[in-house]
Each structure stands twice: as C-alpha cells, then as structure tokens.
Image: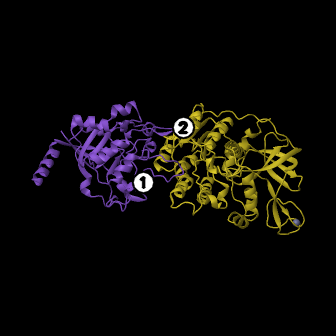
Chain colours: A purple, B yellow
Amino acid sequence: MAADSLVLLAADLAGGRVRVVDLTHTLSPDFPPIVLPPECGQSWPFRQEEISRYDDRGSGWYWNNFSCGEHTGTHFDAPAHWISGRDLPNGTTDTVPVQNLIGPACVIDCSAESAADADFLLTVEFLERWEARHGRIPTRAWVLMRTDWSKRTDPVAYQNLDETGQHTPGPSSEAVRFLVQERDVMGFGTETIGTDAGQAIHLKPPHPCHYYMHGAGRYGLQCLTNLDQLPPTGAIIICPPLKMLKGSGSPLRVLALVPG
Amino acid sequence: MTAPFTRPKRKNPVLRTRLPLPPPGARSRAALGLSAAAAMGKFKLQVCEACRCVQYPPREACGSCLSPRLRWREQDGFGELLADTQVHLSQEPYFRERAPWRIGMVRLDAGPTVIVHLHSACGPAPCRVRVGARLDKAGQGVLIGFPVDEVANMADDRQLREMTCDPKFRKVLITDGKTAVGQALARTIIAAGADLVWVGQAEPWKRSAGLEALSALPQVAIVPLDLTDSSSVVEAAGSIGGRVDILINNAEVHRTYGISARNGTDAARLEMDVNYFGLLRLAQGFGPAMRGRAADGAAGATAWVNLLSIYALSNFPPHGTFSASKAAALSLSQALRAEMRGSGIRVINVFPGPIDDEWNQPLPPPKLAAEALAKSVVSALKDGVEDVYPGDVAQEWLARWEENPKVLERELTA
Ligand SMILES: [Zn+2]
C-alpha cells in the first residue's frame, strides 16, 4: 500500500500532477538579518568569500567559504532556540525526529489584513473563520501564515523598522496557544523575520509564538516565500534543517509538494 | 599672490593615462629623520648636543666637532634666499614631466645653507623666506621655501600641490555615512572644495536621519558599501573605484569590552571584521585603481585616509578588543603605505582620542567632536602629512608614548 503511494507520487511528480514549489529565499549578503540593539550578541548575516575561481588560488575550480548565523535567511527554529524549550528532549537540529520534517501544510491567507496593517495579529477568531471554510486544522500539521511580506523586495520595506522597532505581522498569544493546545500543530511558519510579530516583545508573554511553540517542542519556519503559490490545504512541506550538533536552528531549503 | 588653481579640464579618454613616477626616493638612514618629521608636519634638523651646531644635510656625526650626539629638533625655518632659478632640463623623468621647476638656495638663520623647492610667491633673491618640510610624491621629506607672509591661494602653488592632497576639485569616498564623523567629514570636505562625495551606506534598513539630510546636498551620492561583505566592496570598487581621488575609511566598530567583560568572540570579531578586514577588503578593491590614477591630471588620485585610534599605539584595557583591532589596522596600513608609496598615493593615519559618540558615553570629557576630527583630516590632506593626532587626549598620549612606550603601557595597565 505505502509502496504503491510512493510509486504514484513518483509518477505524479514526473507527470507534473504534483508540482514542487520552492518556499526559500536565496541566501545572499543583502538579505536582512534580525535587528537587535547593537550591544546584544548579533546573528551573522550571510557572507561568502571565494576560495578560488579558476585562478591562481585553484586553477580548475570555483568554490567559496560561507558564514552565517543559525537564524539567517529562510530558516528553521528548533525548540532549544527558546528558553521555554531548553530542557526538552530532541530539541536541537541534530536530534529533531526526521518524520516531523515532512507534513501537511495549512496556509492561512492574511495578506489583505497585513497590507492594511503592518502590525496585524492573527487571532483565534480568524483561525476559526478559516476552519469554517477549509476544515479543521489537522493534528501535526504545519500552519503557514501567508502575508505576502516576501514580496517586499526592498530590504527597508521588508524590515519595516521605525523608531519604535519593527512592524511586521504575526500571531496573537491566544492564537498560538490555540494552535498548540487545541490543534496540536507541528509548527508555525511566516514570511517575516521571526515567527512572532515585529512588536511581539510587547505581547504577553513576549514573543508568544517562540515561547509556546518551542515550549511544546514544536518548530518554527521564518522568511518563507511563495506561500501565495500554495493552496489553503492539500500541500505537503519538506523542511529538514542542517544536522548541526546542538543547533538551535538552521538555514534550510523548504520545498512544498502541491497538487496540480 | 599665487594664481588660483582652477578646475582641471575633463580627461581626454583617447590619451594614455600618465603613469605615476616618483621623484628620487633614496635616502640614507640618517636622512629619514627629516622624512619622519615631515610625515608629522614638522621641519626638524639634527642639532649637535655637544656644540649646538645645526646640521645639514643629515649625517652620522657633527660636521663641526665630530660628536655623534645629534638630536632631531624642530626648526622655525627662517632664512635668507640667496639664489633662485628654474630647472628646465633634468635627467629625472619625474622632473622632466613637470619642468620648469623652481628651486632656491637658502641660508637658514640657524646656520646651514639648504637647497629648497621654491614656492612661486618667493623672491626673487635676495629676500627673506621661511623653509618648511613636506613629503614629496616618493613619500620622502623635502624642503620648501615659502614666503614669510601668507599670500592669497598659497596652497595652489603648482609645485606645492605635488606635495599635498588638497580636496579641491577632487572626488572623495567616505566609507560610512551613518556616523556623525562620516557626516562631518562629508560637509567639511565639501566646504574645502571637493567636487563629489560618495558616502557609504551599510544595512540600509537601519535608517539614519543624518545620512538622509546629507544626501540632500548636491555634491553627495550614497553608495551601498558594507566592509564586512567582500562582494559589496568589490561591487563598489567596480562602480566608482576608477574615479575615487581620496578615500577616507572612517567605518569602524567600537565595542567597549576588555577580555573578561564579555564571553565569546562575537563583538571582538565584528571589530576585527570592520576595522581590520574591512581595510584589507577596501585596499584590495580600491588600491589598484587608485595607484593607477596617481598622476592622472592635476587633481588625480592622491590620498587614502584611515580612521584609527590613539589606542592603536598602546592597548587601553577597558576597550581592549577595540584597541587590538585598531593596532591590527595600524599595522596593515603600514603595509598599505608601502604598496602605495611607489605611486605617490599618500596613506594618512588618523589617531583620535575618544570621540564624542554613544560608545564613549561613560567617559568624561575631553572627547573629540566629530567636526573637530573632520577638520583635522582636511588639514592633514592640505598639509600632506602622514600621521595625525587630533585633540588634546591624542596629543598627550602621543607625547607619553614617544617618551617611553613601556612606561605608557604600565600606566594604562595599572
Ligand atoms: Zn658638534
């Protein structure tokens, strides 16, 4: 039975009946990292230094060294990233159970609301209205918050900083608790820098998505793109982080399998 | 008066760009004392400790009493111009290209008679002049005869301009436009006559009101430039590197930690990445094109300025990792100076004491204002000096360091 479904999947992939959508931004030096006060420890932005390029440093080959933080570009947040998840088993990138890294995705379209209000918070009521149209969010699903924020190609607009900090949409504290406790989701994904809203330090608790998701051993995906190419339900995402020893997160390639 | 320097005509792109040829640069070890003093903006000659006789040319032993106890002492330079002439023919390619060249013979009031490059406003002989020392295109100290009294456009003398790096009509890159120092540098150098000032902008999402105000000036253009990003430096060099006449590297990261005050290497590494590796990336990106344009017309590429710190001389432990990064940058800038010297591009190192910014917030005054620092940089360009120690704190530390670096180290680490 299982073998049959893989044969069918292979045929559907080959025949274009299942499309593969890349939900990943290119890792580039210009992609903005999270902004913290300068006295804090800083996550490195992506950097590339040539080792050789068919030249005197290596005549026949081209390669680079790269550097970046665990939370640079499109990236995965492991439970150990947050203090609430620090003592959980299997909470780092090397120990995350791999079966958790492939699963169904529910895409909550908040693009209109986010365009109208950069500080938009996804609420329980909003999720319940979504469920009324698309069905109940299944257990162990990935919930992806579509805001079209990834279409802001100007880094200034993407960061959207002013003198009170960052203004980007995210989930409310109650919505996160609802997803973790009532729907038992696998993780939460966003298009912005952070699974939490830009102003989430002022919520109760601060950064509720990090706090509750990771406290419950669930995961985060950030800086996603192309969520507008996914159906509300029916897609499967594949999101394995690099297997780094005791990693709190990792840049990664996120792929979605989409019917049609 | 001197004829004012007027805006050079645009370059004829059909003609070969003139190669930079240095004037004769060989000096005896003794004579380098004159260069070292000129690099700091001073005219010094050796004076015999035994018989007070002032020496010229520099030598190993007193020309009068043979005592080896000769000390370099600052001179006021006053003297009598005995003779002056124009050199029309020279075997030296550098002077052939620049003929005629005016020289003179001056009997200093202090004693010796010296040959000088003669400012156009002097003379004819006999008359009173004042001799000063400058660095020539080879980076060596030479003597110049100036008129005793200031004349109009004195800095515009054609021969003197060979020894200086005047910003007038030149194009300048300031690597960080977001700091108060960067903004003051831009305004000051525009006031000094610069034609165009590119100001670097890293992390554009962190907006700067000062930079936005600066960008309203017609002479200012913002250029994306992040010294931690090799590809950004390469791209900026590719875009504007062939037009930069003066590069002022003011980008710096300053964190205020010693070794024990902060775990890990993140802050120290960021300091090194900008203060040291940033300079290295810039030198690889912009150095070759600037060297190639060092004799490109009357206002070609001329100077490279590094914003260092007085802490580069001796570590200030409360800012220990910052001091180390600036010491590394100082060492690298000496290598850059060596690589630039053959072309005549002057590498100017600026060693300020604490600047009045947020990272020096807890320090009591005196702290150096951004405007004062900017003025000292422009003065250094106009005077063509190599090392600048702006402000009272820097001057005081320098004096202590020159007197006994080991004593200063013990004072700072007490
Ligand atoms: Zn003597």
| Residue at point 30%, 42% (across, down) | A144
What is the residue that sits farthest to the bottom in this orientation?
Answer: B67
Distance of label 1 from label 2 (alpha carbons): 28 Å
Q: Are marks 1 and 2 in contact (CB under 8 Å)?
A: no
Q: Which of the 4 quarters of the picture holds residue B2?
A: top right
> Nearest the camera: B369 or A129?
A129
Q: Position of residue B197 (x, y in %)?
A: 59, 38
Question: How many residues crowd around disc 1 within 10 Å: few (fewer than 14), some, or many (20 or more)?
Answer: some
In which quadrant of the rendered image does the C terminus of chain A lie? top left
Left or right: A11 in relation to B393: left
Q: Are marks 1 and 2 on the same chain?
A: no
Residue B312: x and y in percent read 64, 58
Q: Quadrant of ligand 1?
A: bottom right
Mark 2 Cα shell of 10 Å, populated few (<14), some (14-19), many (≥20): some
Q: Which mark is residue B167?
A: none
The chain ID associated with circle 1 is A
- Let me know if residue B12 appears in the view: no
Task: Give amino acid for label 1.
Answer: Gly
Say which mark, if any, is on residue B222: 2
Give the residue at x 33% y 34%.
Answer: A111
Residue A184 lies, in percent from the top left, at 27, 49
Residue A122 visible somewhere in the drawing: yes
Q: Quadrant of residue A259?
A: top left
Q: Name the element at disc 1.
A: loop
Quick one: B93 or B171, which is closer to the camera?
B171
Chain at tag 2: B
Q: Which residue is mark 1?
A: A69
B410 relative to B56, above or below = below
Horizontally, residue A55 falls left or right of residue B384, namely left
Q: Amino acid at mark 2?
A: Ile
Q: Quadrant of residue B151?
A: top right
